[in-house]
């Protein structure tokens, strides 16, 4: 009972998404009512067709004329009903996808640690489609079939109430059976959606890493994993089909028994002179017509259960807390004074802190290099500045005020980031440089940013220059070219704080030289934080922070730390010697 109440609560919430389109839905219901009434009219015409034209041999023009009119009305009603409901359903899908996409873009960073991107895409595509089916499409089938059943039952009671009383025995049994089967549908559909997400994740990983898969001969192992997942998916789908088939078979058998009982009663009524041949045929046609309508209602049960189950997952995302944005202090352009005071961070589900007691000051016009072994917390530290993650202890100040006091959008306008994993979008070079809030930048500023980023040397050679399409994720460009486009974007933003997250770690010598020259144009007069791997700027940084297991273990200039002979000197000897010798 509790499960049914929960399903009903989810469905009521789901129907709220259809409220903006209630006018179209009402029009659709009207069209379906007209269609059902016309169908009942056609059914009722069977009595004069048989009694007058076949039995009494009296030809009447009004009968075929009425039949044509009813068929025309039924077709028109069906057209109005289908168009109105489909229009409402597609709009519900659009609205739900927009809400869900906006929600994902406003979730904190830890939400992306809990749920992978392929699963999010499954929510945006498969789940929203099933939700729409439950919200509108299933409602269409339910209302249309119920109206038709009511119309046919009305004809039956109008023709013979004695024969029609059998329906009151059939209805409760059918309702009880459908309720029992519904619970199994929900369980199976939950497993199917989880299986679909796993399939998408496996395919996404294998296809994006196709070069590694081929290089290490992992095609067979990837296919084996994908094959076992598809097999489980097929088995779950077959279980749903068997459940649906058994219910459908039950409805048809039970309906056939009901029709047989009605025929027996109708036969006795006809022998007693209470039914004419036309009445008998009308009853028979109505009884036979009701059975497939009931069968369709059992099929829509699975659609409804899938939709409610998908809606439960979608609403779980929509109910998730968004990024905290309670700051009220506005900020036009910051000076760039950054202060970390005893900052601590612990990731969800981890037993130890990712960062502990981090304290330092980064002044405007200076470069702060952050070095350390892999996993020491370097990337976590810089992600705290734009508040991609929230701190658990201590505070971070910008120009003397805690960053939580600023409006989130104002804070992030002060920061430009260039990372090793460059993110570009399917579009032109100019669109990628003038991205987001910079989309209205004039062409001259875009061209200047491209030139200062050392990107003009390859952009000018492209067929359409800055208007050249670069493909999905910038796939038509090399790594160094993508990096310079990202630097051009940062130059166009002209933010007072610059974060470089191992921006040249994966580049060849020539590409690194070009990117480093571009960075030299970008860094002056800003508060720059550099996560360093091979960057020559480390040696010229105003201060170097050495992280180890989430703590600052050394702090000073390059020369001071080399002379100290500690962790930094060891890292420099192992990691920076190659970069220094080039």
Image (cartoon, rainbow, N blue to C red):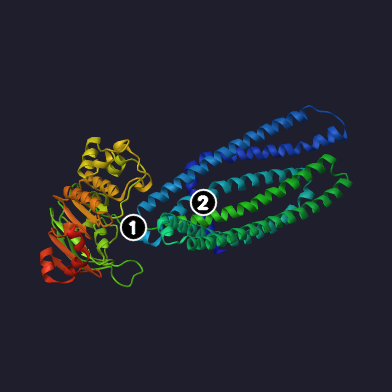
Instruction: Please tell me whether mark 1 sits on a helix, a strand or a loop.
Output: loop
The answer to whether residue 557 of the structure is visible from this angle is no
Quarter of the image that includes the N terminus: bottom right
Marking on residue 127: none
Residue neighbourhood size for the residue with mark 1, other residues' Cα within 10 Å, grouped as few (<14), some (14–19), many (≥20): some
Instruction: Please tell me whether mark 2 sits on a helix, a strand or a loop.
Output: helix
3D distance between C-alphas at marks 1 and 2: 25 Å
Query: What's the residue at 21%, 61% (across, down)?
Result: 578
Quarter of image, res 169: bottom right
Quarter of image, res 234: bottom right
- The residue lying toward the viewer, choosing from 342 and 330, is 342
Query: What's the residue at 16%, 63% (across, down)?
Result: 544
Q: Position of residue 391 (x, y in %)?
A: 26, 63
In the picture of the structure, the residue carrying the numbered disc 1 is 108
The answer to whether residue 522 of the structure is visible from this angle is yes
Name above or below for residue 463 compared with residue 526.
Answer: above
Q: Position of residue 73 (x, y in %)?
A: 66, 33
Marking on residue 131: 2
Query: What's the residue at 36%, 69% (across, down)?
Result: 349
Extreme residue in the top direction: 61
- 1 and 2 marks in contact (CB < 8 Å): no
Q: Position of residue 178 (x, y in %)?
A: 64, 58
Q: Is residue 79 left or right of residue 120?
A: right
- The residue lying toward the viewer, choosing from 496 and 42, is 496
Of the numbered discs 1 and 2, the one sitting upstream in the chain is: 1
- The residue lying toward the viewer, choosing from 345 and 8, is 345
- The residue lying toward the viewer, choosing from 341 and 541, is 541
């Amino acid at each position: 009972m509790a499960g049914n109440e929960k399903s009903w609560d989810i469905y009521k919430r789901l129907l709220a998404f259809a409220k903006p389109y209630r006018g179209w839905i009402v029009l659709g219901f009207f069209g379906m009512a007209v269609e059902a009434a016309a169908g009942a009219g056609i059914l009722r015409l069977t009595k004069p067709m048989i009694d007058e034209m076949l039995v009494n041999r009296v030809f009447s023009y009004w009968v075929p004329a009425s039949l044509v009119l009813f068929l025309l009305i039924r077709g028109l009603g069906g057209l109005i009903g289908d168009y109105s409901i489909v229009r409402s359903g597609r709009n519900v899908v659009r609205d739900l996808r927009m809400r869900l996409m906006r929600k994902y873009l406003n979730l904190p960073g830890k939400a992306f640690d809990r749920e992978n991107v392929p699963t999010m895409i499954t929510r945006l595509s498969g789940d929203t489609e099933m939700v729409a089916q439950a919200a509108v499409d299933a409602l269409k089938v339910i209302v249309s079939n119920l109206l038709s059943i009511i119309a046919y039952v009305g004809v039956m009671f109008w023709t013979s109430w004695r024969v029609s009383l059998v329906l009151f025995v059939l209805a409760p049994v059918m309702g009880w059976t459908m309720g029992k089967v519904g619970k199994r549908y929900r369980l199976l559909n939950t497993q199917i959606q989880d299986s679909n997400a796993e399939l998408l994740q496996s395919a996404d990983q294998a296809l994006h890493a196709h070069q590694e898969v081929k290089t290490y001969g992992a095609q067979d192992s990837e296919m084996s994993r994908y094959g076992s997942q598809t097999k489980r998916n097929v088995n779950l789908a077959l279980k749903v089909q068997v459940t649906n088939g058994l219910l459908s078979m039950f409805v048809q058998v039970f309906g056939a028994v009901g029709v047989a009982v009605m025929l027996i009663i109708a036969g006795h009524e006809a022998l007693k002179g209470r039914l004419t041949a036309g009445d008998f045929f009308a009853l028979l046609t109505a009884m036979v017509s009701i059975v497939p309508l009931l069968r369709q209602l059992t099929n829509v049960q699975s659609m409804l259960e899938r939709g409610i189950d998908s809606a439960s997952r979608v609403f779980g995302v929509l109910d998730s807390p968004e990024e905290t944005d309670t700051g009220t202090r506005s900020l036009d352009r910051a000076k760039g004074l950054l202060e970390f005071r005893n900052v601590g961070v612990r990731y969800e589900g981890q037993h130890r802190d990712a960062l502990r007691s981090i304290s330092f000051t980064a002044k405007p016009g200076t470069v702060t290099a952050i070095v350390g072994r892999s996993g020491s917390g370097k990337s976590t530290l810089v992600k705290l500045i734009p508040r991609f993650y929230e701190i658990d202890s201590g505070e971070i100040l910008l120009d003397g005020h805690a960053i939580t006091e600023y409006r989130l959008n104002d804070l992030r306008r002060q920061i430009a980031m260039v990372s090793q994993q460059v993110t570009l979008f399917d579009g032109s070079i100019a669109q990628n440089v003038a991205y987001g809030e910079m989309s209205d930048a004039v062409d001259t500023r875009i061209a200047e940013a491209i030139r200062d980023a050392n990107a003009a040397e390859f952009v000018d050679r492209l067929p359409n220059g800055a208007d050249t399409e670069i493909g999905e994720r910038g796939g038509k460009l090399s790594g160094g070219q993508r990096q310079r486009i990202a630097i051009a974007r940062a130059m166009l933003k002209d933010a007072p704080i610059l974060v470089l997250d191992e921006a040249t770690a994966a580049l060849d010598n020539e590409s690194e030289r070009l990117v480093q020259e571009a960075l030299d144009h970008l860094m002056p007069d800003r508060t720059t934080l550099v996560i360093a791997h091979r960057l020559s700027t480390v040696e010229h940084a105003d201060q170097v922070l050495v992280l180890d297991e989430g703590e600052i273990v050394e702090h000073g200039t390059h020369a001071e730390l080399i002379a100290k002979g500690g962790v930094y000197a060891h890292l420099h000897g192992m990691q920076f010697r190659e970069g220094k010798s080039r």
